[in-house]
Amino acid sequence: MKQGAGRRSDRLAGDTILRASHRCGRTPLLDPAACIVVLLAPSQRDRLTQSKRAYGSYQRKTATLTSAARIAAVPTFFCCQAAEPEAVGDPDRTFTYEAHGCIWKNEAFLRALDAEDRSALVLAGYWFDCHVTAAALYALADCYDVYIPLDASPGRSREAMRLAETRLFQAGATALLTEQVIYEWAIEICDAKRQAELTALIDY
């Protein structure tokens, strides 16, 4: 057994009950009160390997998602590769991971995530078929509901995307688009002002 595995296993049963209690009797939609956003930032190399158009689309989608998260009071975690740390958000919610690793191996990140006491993870970033898939599988194993906005999660190739999608969605993750996340948050928010601010971010 790897170091730390026992500690996480010991608390999984309790976490499962807590997260299930958040879901029971609530809503079939994404409730912002139960959500956390986790963004896996691209490295400089990732940015250079994509066309300006594709990277620009990713930037617009993640900017819209983080704006919506601020309006809906959804905690947002920014994760970047250790070799290229970037101060992209709240320093208390910015974490690093190894270039060929996974953010779920960062114990400080896991403790911060646990402290939010949320049950649904909205996970996006680079690359869908690599870092996003690995983090999503760990999150599912830790009993989170996992939602992946595909338009904010680029893949390295169509084939890689297809295979990763099959694996993830068989494991229980849910695919959707950024605007669908915001639309559902808007439905579940009771405050009319914040609801209007969220719907203003939606293109349709």
Image (tube, rainbow, N blue to C red):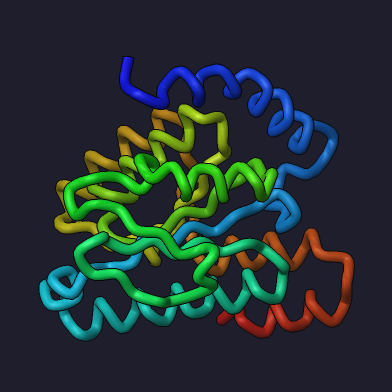
Q: Which residue is depicted at the point 31% across and 41% down?
A: 134
Residue 78: give x, y in percent of width and height: 44, 65
Say how many tags the image has.
Answer: 0
Q: Residue at x 61, y 81 (%)?
A: 201
The relative height of residue 61 versus residue 122 in the rendered view (above or below) is below
- Left or right: 53 in relation to 32: left
Q: Is residue 37 above or below residue 202?
A: above
Q: Residue 186, image x and y in percent? A: 74, 67
Nearer to the camera, 56 or 14? 14
Please identify the residue farthest to the top as the structure is shown. 1
Q: Residue 158 appears at what percent x and percent y?
A: 18, 54
Q: Quadrant of the C terminus?
A: bottom right
Out of 137 and 162, give the one closest to the viewer: 137
The percent position of residue 8, horizontal first and vertical second, equals 50, 25
Q: Residue at x 72, y 43 (%)?
A: 28
Rendered residue at 88%/72% (across/down) = 191
Residue 189: image quadrant is bottom right
Quadrant location, the N terminus: top left
Occupied quadrant, residue 138: top left
Q: Nearer the viewer, residue 118 or 61?
A: 118
Q: Which of the 4 quarters of the picture holds residue 188?
A: bottom right
- 69 or 198: nearer the eye? 69
